[in-house]
Image (cartoon, rainbow, N blue to C red):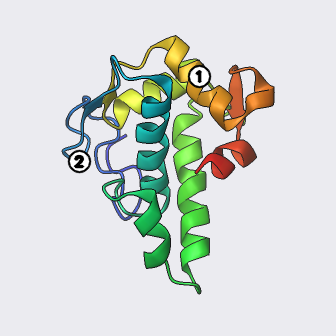
Amino acid sequence: PRGLFSDGFLPGAGDEAGEAGGFSVSLEGLGEDEAARAVWTRLRGFARGKNGATNGASNGATNGATNGTASRSGRALELFQFFDADSKGSIDSREFRAALYMVGFTGVTEDLAGALIRRADPQGGGRAIDYSKFVTAL
């Protein structure tokens, strides 16, 4: 759905890929390491309210110690709920792939989505990721 988050930090959700807040990146042809960096950095930016446009290293310095953590936690939950399309409490590779497309990533195969999930939860076998592992990956 468009305007998923109340403050619009994920303005393109639900749009066609490439229209997600002006963001579009193809993961096609990237190695697993490069794709993982691109995806998790972008998602980390969303969770930190930076619209995914800045890198993870600089985002932490801009969050205030008082309400930055609570805000980031709420955003991470909203992001998780957006990715968890069936509301079962975990994100499988199908959901992950579809949600990545909706936020502007193209060229995400089922195998790549599984590999990205495995990186966030190495013991999970790439099938699904729960909220705690998702937040840790951010």
Quadrant position of residue 130:
top right
The amino acid at mark 1 is Ala
Picture coordinates of residue 94 (x, y %)?
A: 55, 18
Label 2: how many Cα within 10 Å (few below 14, some 14–19, many 20+): some
Query: Which tag is nearer the camera, tag 1 or tag 2?
Result: 1
The residue nearer to you, when weighing 30 against 16, is 30
Label 2 element class: loop
Res 86 seen here: no
User: Is residue 22 toward the left or the right of residue 92 in the image?
Assistant: left
Quadrant position of residue 49:
bottom left
Label 1: how many Cα within 10 Å (few below 14, some 14–19, many 20+): many
The amino acid at mark 2 is Gly
Identify the mark at residue 115; answer none if there is no mark. Answer: 1
User: Is residue 51 toward the left or the right of residue 24 in the image?
Assistant: right
Q: Residue at x 45, y 58 (%)?
A: 56
Q: Is residue 106 above or below residue 49?
A: above
Quadrant of the image containing the N terminus: top left
Count of residue discs: 2
Quadrant position of residue 65:
bottom right
Label 1 element class: helix
Kindly check if marks 1 and 2 are in contact, taking CB atoms under 8 A apart as contact. Answer: no
The residue nearer to you, when weighing 9 against 134, is 134
- The first of marks 1 and 2 along the sequence is 2
Picture coordinates of residue 96 (x, y %)?
A: 53, 28
What residue is disc 2 on? 21
Kindly report the distance in space between the C-alpha atoms of the residues bearing marks 1 and 2. 26 Å
Q: Residue at x 70, y 19 (%)?
A: 127
Q: Residue at x 62, y 46 (%)?
A: 137
Q: Residue at x 57, y 28 (%)?
A: 116
Outermost bottom residue? 66
Outermost right residue? 123
